[in-house]
Amino acid sequence: MTAEGHLLFSIACAVFAKNAELTPVLAQGDWWHIVPSAVLTCLLPDIDHPKSFLGQRLKWISKPIARAFGHRGFTHSLLAVFGLLTLFYLKVPESWIVPADAIQGMVLGYLSHILADMLTPAGVPLLWPCRWRFRFPILAPQKGNQLERVLCMALFAYAVWMPQTLPENSAVRWSSQMINSLQFQFNRFINHQIEQ
């Protein structure tokens, strides 16, 4: 997927997550925290590719990561999300006030990139270091980014339309409960690390 596709997809995912109220923080969150935060991190997984939009600007980081893990390796996994979130919580000074909805927006942006890359034939190694690739190949790279645009705009339209017209469904409720459970476990882990 192109950088433009990832940007559009992250905005659509942020709108969907906020409107579907995937977490209480997102439900009460500020649009001006959630959407810009998602856009800020939506290109970050491609830091493992020196020719990517971000890789070209941060070659000194991109090249070593590309050599160590290759493209669509570690940075496209759930372990990377967990690692970056842990690093953020443990290393960002407490004097920096980062709203919870902005943090969840950043996670949304990163995850939206991984989800978008799952829509390509190459897929992503969600469970890295396990080499299994997870994919739902509906986007073909040789078709250009026109299909990406159409898909992203359709998702955006659905995200705006869905919550107002559909009753609460079990898939949204289940994912919300799963996210809340994972967030609780992650907070326990971080608190344990801080206490040590």
Image (cartoon, helix red, strand yellow):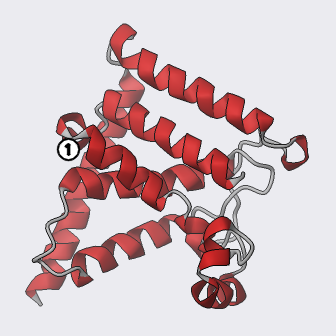
Is residue 15 in sight in this rendering? yes
Q: Is residue 129 visible?
A: no
Q: Is residue 96 above or below residue 5?
A: below
Percent x, y of residue 37: 36, 54
Q: Residue drawn 66% across and 89% down?
A: 68
- 189 sits left or right of 138 in the view: left
- Could you say which is closer to the camera, residue 70 or residue 160? 160
Tag 1's secondary structure?
Answer: helix
Three-letter code, disc 1? Val
Given residues 75 and 161, the one toward you in this image is 161
Position of residue 43 relative to residue 177, above or below, is below
Corner quadrant of residue 9: top right
Q: Position of residue 101 (x, y in %)?
A: 24, 50
Residue on which the image places disc 1: 25
> Where is 9 relative to 20, above or below?
below
In screen coordinates, is 150 left or right of 171? right
Name the residue: 35% across, 34% down.
174
| Quadrant position of residue 123 | bottom right
**Quadrant where the C terminus lies?**
bottom left
Where does the image place residue 13, in percent across and percent down from the top left?
A: 47, 39
Which one is nearer the viewer's eye here, 128 or 14? 14
At 59% from the left and 75% from the top, the residue drawn is 74
Classed neighbour count for the residue bearing mark 1: other residues with Cα under 10 Å, few (<14), some (14–19), many (≥20) = some
